[in-house]
Amino acid sequence: MDQIDLVVIRAGFHGLISAKTYLDVHPSANVTIYNTASSVGGVWAKENLYPGLKTNNMLGTYEFSDYPMDSETYGVKIGEHIPGTVVHRYLTNFVEHFGIYKRIRFGMRVESAERRGGEGWVLTTSSFASSNSSFSPTSSNPNGVERTQVLATKFIVATSLMTDPIMPKFEGREDFEAPVFHSKYFGRNLDTLETAERVTVLGGMKSAFDVAYAYASRGVRVDMVVRESGHGPIWKTHHHTPHNWFSPCVWDSASGYKFIRSFLKSTFIGRYLINKFWSTLESDILHLNDYDSHPETAKFKLWTKMFFIGSINGVLNYENDFFDLVRNGTVRVHISEIASLGRKTVNLMNGEMLRSDNLICCTGWEHTPPLTFLPAGIETSLGLPHSVEPDSRFPSLRDAPPGNLKGKPLPGVSPRENMSLYQLYRFMVLPSFIATRDIAFAGHMLSILTPTRVQIQALWTSAFFSDEMEEVRYEAVLWNRLGRWSFPQGWGVRFPESVFEEVAYLGCKVRRKGSW
């Protein structure tokens, strides 16, 4: 069995900078990145791109500090959102410039991880044919899949929270006679932009707006179905303004201004100012988007207060006004459920029958790591999400109502509300393995300052692999539970996220030794 000093899973923002930073500290280390896709980028991999895809961030806010994304090289101007093709090109250039590309094994998936005493982690990997993989189908292995094991002395799970899509199962799927796919695979179904006359898009998140715009801007009729039993449509803003003074945060002391924070959150006047800030922000968005100008755009109003949604928001970064496509009838909005599918027909619970050449499901992502930790059931002690049931002494708790009183899981999808939260210290380290310092997680929180955050996390992780940490377990529980309290209508009920708290998180202090 081959032994590797450090294995990183996935070649996205998190994995690439984690590997690069570790090599900066340990230049002679044997570091390997396993990447399922055939290109770098994670969500920005070449096979995931589609026309019109852009970042919510503008130029200058979506780059690594030691490798700028300049206008001359990438053709993006200050104040412009960055096209997905540019992000992919930038990350490809990054790995080539720093010599990381040769360490990536494309077409490789880590299926399981099992700790072996004090030696590290035994990883079972599967390889399959891809344009960048040296492995290909043979007569003895016609499926093109080969499983091997390696021993990783240290191990970084950099899979982020957008790896495995959640795909509902609909009655009548076999009768639909048309493509049904998750938005993750939109980039692999671009031919439908030319062949489809009418499509149905399920979802109200940013990806649903992106997909709907891609079709509608080409004249394809779009029916957007926003589940009555779901989260509803996202807040759609014109820019991000991170300011963590006005959001509850258990780690905000790291960014200073103690008096101002205490005043805002501990006094009547301060809390009034906080409430005024959020209500003004909501009013501005409602005014700018002019929802009430048309009955169809009015359906996009958020169903809950912005204060409680966390990162469930998106920027209107399209070439033309998305809502013009709604007002002129190219995009129609349905607040309902998909009851079943028929021959090129999507049947809704309200009785509507939508003719459709495609059904694109923008239905989110599994928030658990896309690999199995062994032995079975170890997630309970590791601090990773796992199924939990209310205490048997209190059976009435099993019938607790959901946040949305009409809420229910997608067809064929198990409910996520009965999953425990992550218990990662600083959203990166399992408390159970603080002493061994041989596993860390990167990208297991959502935020709006990804490149900056992942650089700091990568530096912190490299220090962690060489240092000891204290007071871990209490802080891990407190920080991970904050989202459930602060963003009950956002993703905080499942995994860590931050918007206005991001600056404070970046300033969190870590005890250091030597050159750290």
Image (cartoon, grey):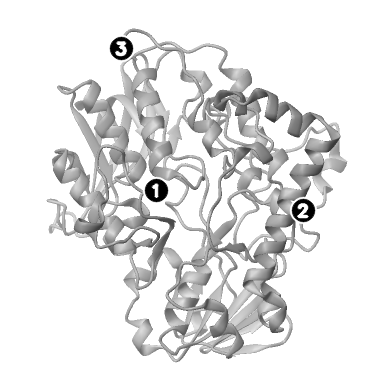
- SS for callout 1: loop
Q: Answer with mark 3 or mark 2, whichever residue precedes in sequence.
A: 2
Query: Is 364 in front, or is 60?
Result: 60
Residue at figure coordinates x 54%, y 60% from the top left: 314
Residue at figure coordinates x 65%, y 23% from the top left: 258
The reply to whether dot 3 and dot 2 touch (C-beta < 8 Å) is: no
From what the image shows, is residue 142 above or below residue 356?
above
Query: Is 431 in front, or is 374?
Result: 431
Residue 502 in the image: x percent, y percent?
Answer: 53, 38
From what the image shows, is residue 171 above or below residue 281?
below
Residue 241 in the image: x percent, y percent?
Answer: 56, 50
The CA span between labels 3 and 1 is 28 Å
The three-letter code of the residue at mark 3 reads Ser
From what the image shows, is residue 233 above or below residue 322?
above
Q: Which mark is residue 61?
A: 1
Q: Badge 3 is on which residue?
A: 515
* Disc 2 crowd, CA 10 A, few/some/many (<14, 14-19, 20+): few
Name the front one of labels 3 and 1.
1
Q: Residue furthest top?
A: 514
268 horizontally vs 188: left or right = right
513 horizontally vs 350: left or right = left
Residue at figure coordinates x 18%, y 27% from the top left: 30
